[in-house]
Image (cartoon, helix red, strand yellow):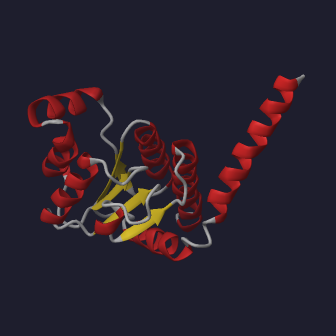
């Protein structure tokens, strides 16, 4: 019986935290609006590249698939283990994404990075590579510390005021998939 009470309280507490993070959409509405307008410019031109580590890599894959399937936007993620392990082995893990951008990115493309901490070296190096390639914009999704390194070098920055990975990642996924649903309205 006591275990049931603890479980129920834990579930309700987690839902409240997630709701609180989603409620921060108000604080991020201008950045979300900019992000949506940028995505809409990519219909039928250039490419969108999206990257994440761990759970964020799964979010990147989901967004990439849904965006490509539901719009005229070409969105790529590079979560194939062969490309990751090849480039990580040959150029170190912190450089595998920048190496991918150097191989597949072109001037005018868009980079989206997802890093809960905003400190992932491979994401920071990806932004540097995108800048050298003259990408159109860099969009960052982060959490934890508001003044994290990745957020400080993006053009459009979506930040979650949380220190819990699952809250941050679920909010990032919510926002990204919300963009797909909105973009579908413009492609009918």
- Farthest residue to the front: give it: 2
- Farthest residue to the left: give it: 90
Q: Nearer the viewer, residue 74 or 52?
A: 52
| Residue 142, position as x, y percentages in the image | 43, 56
Q: Is residue 49 above or below residue 44?
A: above
Q: Nearer the viewer, residue 69 or 8?
A: 8
Q: Is residue 152 above or below residue 11?
A: below
Q: Is residue 72 visible?
A: no
| Residue 78, position as x, y percentages in the image | 30, 40
Q: Quarter-wise, where is residue 6 in the image? A: top right
| Residue 62, position as x, y percentages in the image | 48, 42
| Residue 104, position as x, y percentages in the image | 18, 49
Q: Quarter-wise, where is residue 107 in the image? A: bottom left
Q: Quarter-wise, where is residue 93 in the image? A: top left
Q: How many marks?
A: 0
Q: Is residue 91 visible?
A: yes
* Point 32% across, 68% down: residue: 152
* Point 16% across, 57% down: residue: 129
Q: Is residue 95 above or below residue 47?
A: above
* Point 86% across, 25% down: residue: 2
* Quadrant of image for the C terminus: bottom right
* Quadrant of image for the N terminus: top right
Q: Tell me if 177 is positioned left or right of 48 in this view.
A: right
Q: Tell me if 166 is positioned left or right of 54 in this view.
A: right
């Amino acid at each position: 019986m006591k275990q049931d009470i603890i479980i129920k309280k834990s579930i309700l507490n987690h839902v409240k935290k997630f709701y609180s993070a989603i409620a921060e959409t108000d604080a991020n509405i201008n950045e979300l609006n900019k992000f949506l307008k940028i995505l809409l410019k990519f219909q039928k031109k250039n490419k969108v590249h999206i990257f994440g580590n761990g759970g964020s890599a799964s979010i990147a894959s989901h967004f990439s698939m849904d965006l490509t399937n539901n719009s005229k936007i070409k969105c790529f993620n590079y979560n194939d283990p062969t490309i990751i392990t090849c480039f990580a082995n040959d150029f170190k893990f912190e450089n595998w994404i920048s190496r991918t951008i150097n191989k597949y990115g072109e001037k005018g493309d868009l980079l989206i990075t997802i890093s809960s901490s905003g400190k992932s070296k491979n994401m920071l190096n990806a932004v540097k590579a995108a800048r050298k390639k003259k990408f159109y914009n860099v969009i960052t999704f982060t959490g934890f510390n508001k003044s994290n390194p990745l957020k400080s070098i993006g053009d459009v920055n979506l930040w979650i005021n949380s220190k819990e990975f699952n809250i941050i990642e679920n909010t990032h996924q919510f926002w990204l998939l919300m963009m797909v649903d909105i973009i579908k309205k413009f492609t009918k």
